Amino acid sequence: MYRYQLKESSSGHTTLVCHSDNQAIRLHSAYDPVREAGRQVSAFNPGRASHIIICGMGLGYHLQAIQELWPDRKLIIVEHDPEVLDLARTVNPDIMEGATVITGRFDVQNVLEPIEISSFRGARVYRHRPSCQLYPGFYEDMAADIQQFFSSKMSDLLTRFEFEKLWIRNIFRNLKNLERGYAVHDLFGSFKSIPGIIVSAGPSLRKNIDQLAMLKNRALIVCVDTALKPVLKKGITPHIVMTLDAQSHSIKHFLGTHTGNAVLLADVVSYPKLVRDYNGPLLFSTTARYYDAPDGSLKREATPVMDWVEQHLPPLGDIQSGGSIATSAFDLVRNLGCDPIILVGQDLAYTGREIHTSGTHHNDEWLPVINRIKNLDTINQSVIRRRKIKFVPSFGNSKPVLTDFVLDLYRQWFSDSAGKVPIEVINATGGGAAIPNTIETSLDTLTSRIPKQKVPPEKILQQFLSHNTTLPTGKIYEEMAGFREQLLHLRSIASTELENENDGHNTEELNAILSTDDMNSILKPFLRKTLFYFNRHPDLPEKKMKEMMCADIVDAADILLPMLSP
């Protein structure tokens, strides 16, 4: 434990000394901390980076030097000891004004979430050497976590660029399917204190899949779509099967299956043909992300267009995702009220150097190409070799198990989530990677420990379906007709602007229409890439910006108008 002491330097500026049991460590020069900071910062070059991560605050002399040299950069201060921050404010009350301050790993997500990633141009790390010598592991981990956060945010943005148009197309195409489905929102809380089992398709699923049959009346079984075929092949019908992939290949998880009375929970962006052809009961949800804003309020970021759709429909039910369908299933069973949450087939690793359990559609597709030279093992190995692999602690604390960078991110997500929820999270996978903050046990042990429910999960679902009404869609079709007329008018203006490039008399009306709530909600995703380009190129000529924007509006209208037709 360190103690801090303010002292006056030879130059008259305050310096800071850190005392441990055996020594005193100066965090700044005893002679002139301002000159020292200027000299050290002069050797630092942030390049084009829009953000500078400052590891170690001290009294902030280096922070002042950085602000003077690069006043346009966004500063993120990382400090291990809150006492140091208080001392810095004592010496200079305004020292951290405008900067973002982080004191621990759990701050990273909440504190950085409001940052507008469209203006992000990289982050460089400045290390205050004395601070980093006190806590080297902390500052290295924090710098890596922050860089990973920005990397994930950029990845999310690129995912939006690639998939937003498909998501929006699927949302409008799924409106017909909504008419025979129910909102999962109305089911939230219905399984209070009933165990919830999330079944994923990890390689270890084959070891304990047979026990699931004995738990059918003791726990709610939620199966991700990837694991559906292996479960059904064992004669086990899950209570709920969950799908959220917008792409057409997701239907392969269902081809040739008989799902009986299993309820399909589909994200509203799910592949419409899969939802349309499903013969059983339907539930609908939407993916949304919640985070704390700097003002302390809780912010919600929904799937594109859903802000507009939800004005004309009852709430479907928000499910947060950590990037995989299994993370979405975790949030689902939490919202349903399940206690405890039990993970099965959640290897998050290449157990036995396999990718999935046997029986998934992936394995089925590989079977026809197997021959004397190429077998399932060689196919698995060729896939794994293309991944960014690493070793992590394994279930049961046996020898480390092979995983990759993405799977390990999901492992961290489950660990963080298990540490935050007020209920037990049990890892009954029986293999794969260890997940901190979960209780490891076997599914066989749970089978003898979990009693039969007085009202079985299947009965709860049946009662819900018989006592609730399907989603009403009449109002949204009326609104779509009105929006279609606005969009036709906007397209006409944008087209005229492109044809009369030196005119510009319609620019004011164009901007007025674009600023309306409806137009902003529906059209903005189609303009996102161009707006991102504008943010990164602020010196772009106004004429060029207008041309690009009008061309995007015309293209977006041509995509949207057929979707909005009756």
Image (spheres, grey):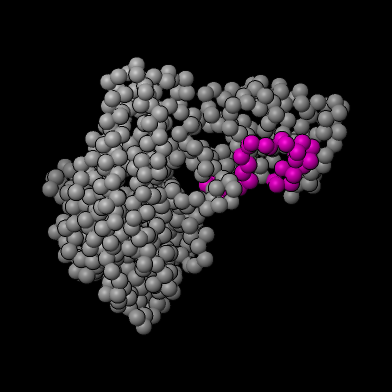
Q: Provide residue 117's location: percent of width, then percent of height.
A: 47, 36
Instruction: Identify the residue at horizontal 70%, vertical 47% (top origin).
Output: 82
Instruction: Identify the residue at horizontal 33%, vertical 36% (top origin).
Output: 526
Extreme bottom residue here? 454
Q: Nearer the viewer, residue 536 or 384?
A: 536
Magenta stretch encompasses residue 95: yes
Extreme top residue here? 502
Q: Provide residue 386's location: percent of width, then percent of height.
A: 32, 38
Q: Is residue 404 visible?
A: no
Name which quarter of the figure residue 165 lies in.
top left
Instruction: Identify the residue at horizontal 55%, vertical 48% (top origin).
Output: 293
Give the answer, above or below, for where 8 lies relative to 254: above
Name which quarter of the figure residue 24 lies in.
top right
Read off the magenta span.
Answer: 81-109
Judged left or right of residue 423, residue 191 is: left
Q: Nearer the viewer, residue 536 or 504?
A: 504
Instruction: Identify the residue at horizontal 30%, vertical 50% (top origin).
Output: 479
Magenta stretch encompasses residue 429: no
Give the answer, above or below, for where 456 lies relative to 472: below
Q: Is residue 261 visible?
A: yes
Name which quarter of the figure residue 67 lies in.
top right
Q: Provide residue 357's location: percent of width, then percent of height.
A: 27, 56
Q: Provide residue 75's location: percent of width, then percent of height.
A: 61, 34
Q: Nearer the viewer, residue 340 or 448?
A: 340
